[in-house]
Amino acid sequence: MRCTVIGAGVCGLSCAVRLLEAGWAVEIVAEKFSPETTSDRAAAVWYPFLVAPADRAKVWAMASYSVFSELSASEPEAGVIMRTGREYLRENMESPDWHTAITRFRLLGPGELPDEYVHGWEFEVPVVEMPRYMAWLRARCESLGGTLTQRRLESFDDVEGDALVNCSGLGARELAGDDDLHPMRGQVLYLDQTPAVGHFDQQPETLAYVIPRSDCTVLGGTAQINDWNESPSEDDSELILAKCTAMWPGLDTSRITGVAVGLRPARSAVRLELESGERPLIHNYGHGGGGVTLSWGCADEVVALLSAAT
């Protein structure tokens, strides 16, 4: 049986790997491949963020957490590293519902909180270094026999295969005629300085993060709905630096080395479902800021849906 996966971002490649492992012959068709995908610009840390439906997202996220944790221990070339981070809040809130399912989690004491913040917690989760990880995912697909074709699709009829998996991200707005899909613009800065821990303010209205990687530290961010502008904004850069410095006063703004912009594929809820027709078509898009966090759990569900349909 042959399956065509449309889209070569983190969700598309993860689905391709799982399908290949399940015995499918897989072709990945995409307009862009790494390093030109939105996924390449992701920060990216495992952390459920701005995604619905919450009940399904939790299942997908925990499945992905297990895979990333294993990769961090067994596949160093994948670029997945377990790192300590701290989440800060301006009001008291309950701990996230996933806190009992991860290895390390504790509440912060008053002396561990930056100014402006009154509550928070420390955790250890996977940080996924996307330039390395996307290369590893592609190599994994190819080693399992997957093929890659670069071209733009105008219709699902333009591709062959006994089944299709649509992981086209924002491209699904036209390809699937989905007006609910929209961009959530994200801008990040790259810094040649490493903090002792990561720092996070994950509230949508004050979104900020400091994520240490082996090659740099990523500073963010923005979550600008329906903004299609892919050019960096100096105003956004200044705002990001102000928000990150509030969490990490030791940040040296003179050590900024670069800036990047990506358009997250956002939707009122992730669309992961089977569309019945002449051949099975599974949609898997609209992950917003949670593409990496949900990727493996969604890929597992795609395989299960496809197995049940064929």
Image (spheres, rainbow, N blue to C red):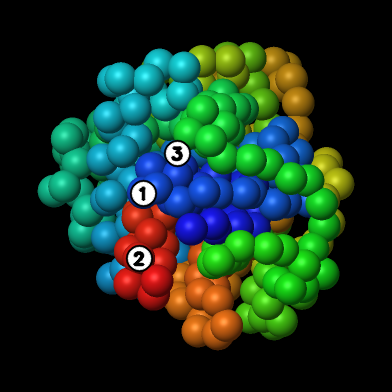
Residue that mark 2 sits on: 307
Q: What residue type is labelled 1?
A: Ala
What residue is rendered at 45% in x and 51% in y?
A: 24
| Camera-side mark, 3 or 1 | 1
Residue 213 x/y as whole percent: 51, 21
**Circle 3: is it few (<14), some (14-19), or many (20+) Cα within 10 Å?**
many
Q: Which of 36 and 118 is in front in this view?
A: 36
Query: Height in image: 94 above or below 196?
Result: below
Disc 3 element: loop
Residue 255 x/y as whole percent: 69, 16
- CB within 8 Å, label 2 to label 3: no
What residue is rendered at 46% in x and 71% in y?
A: 272
Disc 1 element: loop
Residue that mark 1 sits on: 22
Residue 198 x/y as whole percent: 42, 29
Disc 2 from disc 1: Cα separation = 9 Å
Query: Height in image: 306 above or below 113?
Result: below
Q: Which of 253 and 144 is in front in this view?
A: 144
* Quadrant position of the C terminus in the picture: bottom left
The single residue placed furthest to the left in the displayed view is 100
Q: Which amino acid does label 2 sit on?
A: Ser
Q: Which of marks 3 and 1 is nearer the N terminus?
A: 1
Q: Would you say 310 lies left or right of 129 here?
A: left
- CB within 8 Å, label 2 to label 1: yes
Q: What residue type is labelled 3?
A: Val
Query: Height in image: 12 above or below 106?
Result: below
